[in-house]
Every structure is written in structure tokens, then in C-alpha cells.
Amino acid sequence: MLSDRSRLLYDYFVQSFAQVTNPPLDAIREELVTSLTGAVGPMANLLATQQAKTRLIKVDFPVINNDQLDQILHLDDEDGAALTLKVRGLYRPDGGEESLRTRIAEICEKVSTAVNRGVQFVIISDRDSNGAWLPSRPCC
């Protein structure tokens, strides 16, 4: 309120997450009985008898920061092949609904091809959005 700079979007998500739990969870003071730790990544088939090679990333909090996102973006397998794909999730609004549909189809095709190559993590980014490029997500 006293600053002329807006707050980070990260702060908004942290605050929103704190408001959804009822009763409010305090993971710091109640760490013995409360855990916000989760895992991100492909899960192996629990019924399969052979050992599967999947990589799960442990996150200590449901909202990750830019440094953690950057670490995920630069994951490689033993052969040096990238395990993460970053897709630009923007489209040109001047093309209307058809432009959005076309862009979503392009994103789906790119992600499908990458997953078939062995990519395990997909990051859809809306960075650098402006009046000419809008995020490719449904509204309302």
C-alpha cells in the first residue's frame, strides 16, 4: 500500500494457498504433523515388475520460485538429453478465436512430439506477454 511497485505474482499464490486451508495450516510451527512437500514428474507403474526410470522432483512448497523453475528447466538424463521442454504459450489476439485454436493445436503437437522423444517435464510459459501476444489460456 505504501509502495508504488506492484507485488510479485508469487506472493499472490502463496497468500491464496494460505486462505484455502481450513483450519489455517502453519507448516512451520506444525511441521511434525503437516507437510506441504509434493512431487512433480511422471509416476512409474506400481504394478510393473521391472524397474522404471522416472525422475520425480521433490518440491517443499506448492508454489515454486524462479530459481526452482530454472533448475527444472535444465534437467538432463544420463546421456545429456534434455528432460524438460519450455513452450511459449502465447498467441496473437488479432486473429481472434481461430488464432487461439491454431496456437493451442501447435502447442499440443509440439508437446506430443517432445514426450514421444522422452521429455518428462513441460513448462508452458506466458512470459513476455503484451498487447500483441496474449497467454493461450481460456478466460472465465
Image (cartoon, rainbow, N blue to C red):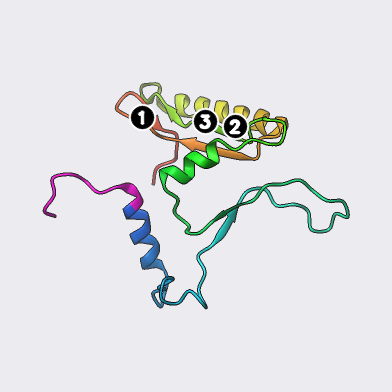
Q: Amino acid at mark 1?
A: Asp
Distance between the alpha carbons at the discs numbered 1 and 2: 20 Å
Residue 76 location (% of width, % of height): 64, 35
Q: Of 39 and 16, which appears nearest the observer?
A: 39
Is 33 rendered above or below residue 140? below
Distance between the alpha carbons at the discs numbered 3 and 2: 10 Å
Residue 43 location (% of width, % of height): 70, 52
Identify the element where label 1 is drawn: loop
Identify the element where label 3 is drawn: strand
Residue highlighted by disc 1: 128
Q: Of 140 and 63, which appears nearest the observer?
A: 63
Residue 125 location (% of width, % of height): 45, 35
- Bounds of the magenta segment: 1-10
N-terminal-most mark, 3 or 2: 3
Residue mark closest to the camera, 3 vs 2: 3
Which residue occupies 33% across, 61% down?
A: 15
Number of the label disc, if any, that sits on residue 108: 2
Which residue occupies 42% across, 48% down?
A: 65
Q: Badge 2: how crowded within 10 Å, few (<14), some, or many (20+)?
A: few
Q: Badge 3: how crowded within 10 Å, few (<14), some, or many (20+)?
A: some
Residue highlighted by disc 3: 87
Which residue occupies 47% across, 59% down?
A: 61
Identify the element where label 2 is drawn: helix
Q: Look at the image and say whether residue 2 sits in the magenta stretch.
A: yes
Picture quarter containing residue 20?
A: bottom left
Residue 123 location (% of width, % of height): 52, 38
Q: Amino acid at mark 2?
A: Cys
Q: Amino acid at mark 3?
A: Val
